[in-house]
Amino acid sequence: MALHFELVTPEKLLRSEDVHMVVVPGTEGDFGVLAGHAPFMSIIRNGDLTIYSGPNSISGRIHVEGGFAEVSEKGLTVLAEKATEAA
């Protein structure tokens, strides 16, 4: 079962894809989201989103600055003030 992940900035939709897991830099600490996660909302801090295509396969890192993350029955949506592909 895959998690639907969307990353949105004020300029555009940057990502909309099905993934295994995303680790988000929350203000209370990093948290991982898998398919079926309980509904949840968090403010995010500046840091890197880590996107996993499989249990041990990192498919990308995206640096985000400010915003919110919402987990719902539809998946994970991150609304970031700024986002850039991490090196």
Image: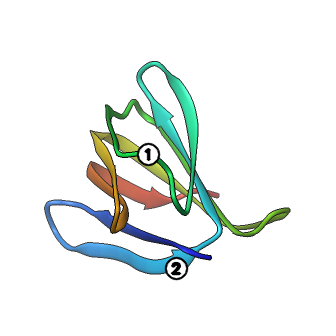
Q: Which residue is mark 2?
A: 18
Image coordinates for residue 61, horizontal then vertical, percent? 60, 58
Find the distance from the CA under tag 1 to the CA under tag 2.
Answer: 17 Å
Quick one: 38 or 57, which is closer to the camera?
38
Mark toward the start of the polypeptide (1 vs 2): 2
Snapshot quadrant of residue 30: top right
Quick one: 54 or 49, which is closer to the camera?
54
Q: Quadrant of the N terminus?
A: bottom right
Residue 21 has which mark?
A: none
Question: Which of the two marks, 1 or 2, is nearer to us in this view?
Answer: 1
Residue at 33% across, 33% down: 42
Residue at 26% across, 75% down: 13
Q: Which residue is mark 1?
A: 38
Query: Looking at the image, which residue sits at the far right?
Result: 56
Tell me the amino acid under the disc marked 1.
Ala
Tell me the amino acid under the disc marked 2.
Asp
Residue at 65% across, 68% down: 20
Q: Is residue 80 above or below residue 5?
A: above
Q: Secondary structure at mark 1?
A: loop
Q: How is the image coloured?
A: rainbow
